[in-house]
Amino acid sequence: MFPLIYDFWHQAFETQKAAGDTGGWAFTYSFFNLFQYPTFRGACAGLTAFILTLLAGPRVIRKLISLKLGQPIRTADEVHKLAELHGGKLGTPTMGGVLIVGSVLVATLLWTRPLNPFVALCACTMSACALLGFCDDYKKVREKKSDGLSGRTKLAWQIAIALIAACFIYFKPEVSGIGATAGQLADGAGFRLGKDFFSISALSFPLFKEPLLDLHWLIIPFFTLVIVGCSNAVNLTDGLDGLAIGCSISTALAYAVLAYLAHRFYIATEYLVIPHNPYLGELFVFLFALAGAGFGFLWFNCHPAKVFMGDTGSLAIGGALGTAAICTKQELMLVIIGGVFVMEAMSVILQVGSFKLRRKRIFKMSPIHHHFELLGWHENQVINRFWILSIMFAIFGLTLLKIV
């Protein structure tokens, strides 16, 4: 909405300026010029999402409680000692992810250009993943079991959502440059690495100033893997109060910085030599809205949690972050910036693989945050230390931008 107000003001300003009418309303209300800057709108979007989450939070929590949408806890037969540690969480309302997704979408509509291809892609992917997570959560609370949708069903829908997103970014000329006209390319369609056209199908990494590998059409399944993998990794991390949302905030802010740098022509092409696309400025605003909603949700989700995000939130946030990594063409950086999510996912993969191959477990329990709980760490210790790791991973990832 506010970018449209800026467009209206700017048109009036240029008209009055050409006519020499310096006393017109456009000159009087020159503060509308602020709405052109992604930094200002990003700060406003983050603050808007934060306030909306705080205001709506108590009402949503009360509604979830009244609907008896409490989180089922796995029994002692399933998780043994962990059931004792988490017994007090029984009945805590879940599906709190609707707070995050709703606040982000409202802030996005207010402060971004929602038809921007990157914003539209991230918002739609997040919403689709949220709907899938909602179905999973609803099945859990309806049947009063910790098992929701079957793994195959959930994975199939995740792949379908991610595949549509991957095809959109690959075949959309304004994003990929593939099939773009000469005029579109001149207007900034596609990516640039340095001053040369950078194929959407190529992989890059800040330590290398040339593309690492061009996957051609195979980039579509790779994009799908990134979105599905990130969505599931955030979902696996969501096991302790505030753990997943805290790590999501640092990851979202890091990618917001990457999006801002990548949309500035000189910084991206001359100084940092990272993939540049002028449309990425709006993605910066979207990611700040996601971070703001995350801080607002953390207000209610920190230990002891009054509400859980559920799969509604974790799948949505993971899908949005994975899509943002693709949009900035920094997919490989997600392994570093989202290091905690990688740790959590890898711990499950290694645990399952080891048990199937050797009939032995590597960890006391996976995901790895439960391993540390069973070692005797208090829940708050695990959460705070993982937050520290997440912040350090994000900072380290950003410092790689100008090592070479």
Image (cartoon, rainbow, N blue to C red):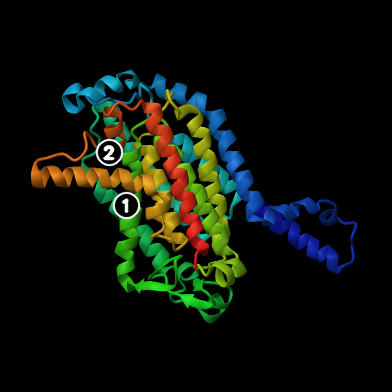
The residue under the point 58% across, 43% down is: 46
Relative height, residue 121 to residue 95 (above, below): below
Give amino acid for label 1: Val
* Relative depth, front residue between 41 and 267: 267
Which of the pair 388/48 is nearer the observer?
Answer: 388
Residue at image point 16% right, 39% down: 361
The earlier-in-sequence mark between 1 and 2 is 1
Residue 8 position, x and y percent, is 72, 57
Mark linked to residue 367:
2
- Report helix, strand or loop for mark 2: loop
Q: Is residue 262 at all visible to an observer of this figure? A: yes
Residue drawn at x 42%, y 70% as measured from the top left: 200
How many numbered circles are shown? 2
* Residue kind at label 2, given as amino acid type: Pro
Please name the residue that numbered disc 1 is placed on. 228
Along the viewing direction, whichever of 360 and 292 lies nearer the viewer = 360
Q: Disc 1 versus disc 2: distance between alpha carbons?
A: 17 Å
